[in-house]
Amino acid sequence: MRETFFEYVRIAMLFTGAVALVHFVGGFKGPQAILLGGAFAIIAVWLHNLRQTLAAFKPYRITIGIDYEALWEDLKLIPAAEPKFENFHFTAITPAVFARSDESEYSQLLTLYKQVPCGADTWLAGPGEFRSGPSFFFRPGRNGYQFGLHVQAEWWEHHRQQLTQALSNHALEYGNDLVLGVLPYGYIPEHVRRWNEPVSLWHPFDRKQRRWKKTLTQHGWSFNDDDPLYIRHRYSGIQYSDI
């Protein structure tokens, strides 16, 4: 709502400026200045929107990394021998279709599920139950891409008692999923794909970049200005790259 309001304000300012320009430079007065100025403002907005719509899509690659070592440490799991960190690569073929490099799968969603390797069984199955350790997930959610663990509900209720309060207070969501973090929508791919380009008729990129840094920091992400295409979370890393 706030962004919409400011967009209307900017359009009004553009309209006023165009009318003033036509009036003082062109010498038009009254209704003529309003009509010509309004026409120029409408054409400017239309050309900007057309440019945005017709911008050619460029395939890109997103790498999602899982930090098993951090998960083992925080969740008090027995470490496996290898690996401590694992990357999974997704290639955006179109704006809505991703190819996953490790399994040659295609998906309309940027989604990842991976069993967390552990040095010992984390769940001793009872009669008629399946043995299943925690699985890492990265998937679209309500407010952004969620990542965390899919667990056995009974195991979690028992296991959480030995964890720090920050983790033990996490409640399981639908499907026995434990959400550990969120990557807000909009970062992939619009933010990183246009790192050195203007993204709006009204704002230079650096202003939008500052807002993204603030938002990412609030969600627990860290970044290095010398490597702007990589962001890091306690349990995951996201790397963008051109093709």
Image (cartoon, rainbow, N blue to C red):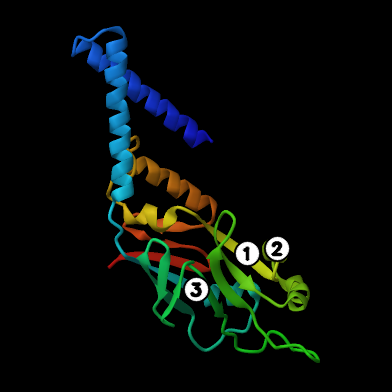
Q: Is residue 11 left or right of residue 184?
A: left
Q: Quadrant of residue 103?
A: bottom left
* Residue 122 vs residue 58, the one in the foreground: 58
Residue 224 placement: quadrant = bottom left
Along the viewing direction, whichever of 118 and 140 lies nearer the viewer = 140
Q: Is residue 243 visible?
A: yes
Residue carrying label 2? 170
Query: Looking at numbered disc 2 in the image, what kind of residue is underneath it?
Result: His
Percent of width and height locating residue 47: 28, 38
Distance in Å between CA atoms under marks 3 and 1: 14 Å
Q: CA distance from mark 3 to mark 2?
A: 20 Å
Position of the C terminus by quadrant: bottom left
Name the residue tied to disc 1: 179
Q: Label 3 sits on what residue type?
A: Ile
Contact (Cβ within 8 Å) of mark 3 with mark 1: no
User: Given contact means CB atoms under 8 Å apart, are the residues at marks 2 and 1 in contact?
Assistant: yes
| Helix, strand or loop for disc 3 | strand
The relative height of residue 91 versus residue 24 in the rendered view (above or below) is below
Sequence order check, earlier mark of 3 and 2: 3
